Image (cartoon, rainbow, N blue to C red):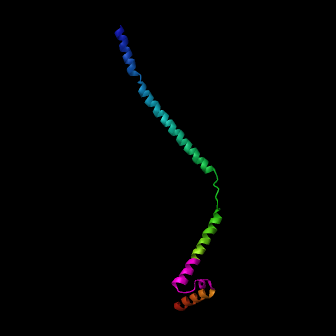
Amino acid sequence: MVHNDTEVKKEDSTLTPEPSETNENTSVKIETKQQVKEASSREERKKDELKKPRIRILPIWLRLIFVLLLFAAALAGGLAVGYGMVGDGNMMDVFEKETWLHIIDLVKKDLQ
């Protein structure tokens, strides 16, 4: 009869999972819970970032004015260098009205 009890115990032990299997399964569950927590915390951080208004050092309208001023300065510098150094004229003559009237007259004369 003792023999039968040990057989029953052997059968019971095969039906229940080993402790190492249980630990592996629970560790997988913990990892997935941690991943879910991390994902939700990332989403919350993104939402917080979207909710916070961004404070700009320079407003957009001031940036546009700054870009336009840089464009005008680059144009003036290019005209002065082109007329003064490449064209062998005085660099400041490019900003006089008579110079541009003369250039326009030359272009119109060639077209006729």
How many numbered marks have been drawn onto this rendered protein structure? 0
Residue at point 57% right, 48% down?
46
Residue 9 rendering spot, x and y as whole percentages: 38, 15
Position of the N terminus by quadrant: top left
Is residue 59 magenta-colored?
Answer: no
| The magenta segment | 76-96
Q: Name above or below for residue 59 compared with residue 52.
A: below
Residue nearest the viewer, comparing 40 with 98? 98
Residue 37 rendering spot, x and y as whole percentages: 54, 39
Question: Is residue 46 shown left or right of residue 24?
Answer: right
Residue at the outermost top position: 1
Which of the 4 quarters of the picture holds residue 67?
bottom right
Q: Kindly report the secondary structure that dominates the magenta region of the rendered protein.
A: helix
Q: Name above or below for residue 3 compared with residue 27.
A: above
Question: Is residue 23 shown left or right of residue 61?
Answer: left
Q: Name above or below for residue 97 compared with residue 62.
A: below
Which of the 4 quarters of the picture holds residue 43?
top right
Residue 8 rendering spot, x and y as whole percentages: 38, 14
Is residue 85 magenta-colored?
Answer: yes
Q: Name above or below for residue 10 compared with residue 56.
A: above
Which of the 4 quarters of the picture holds residue 4?
top left
Residue nearest the viewer, comparing 11 with 45? 45
Residue at point 55% right, 78% down?
78
Residue nearest the viewer, comparing 54 with 109? 54
Residue at point 61% right, 83% down?
95
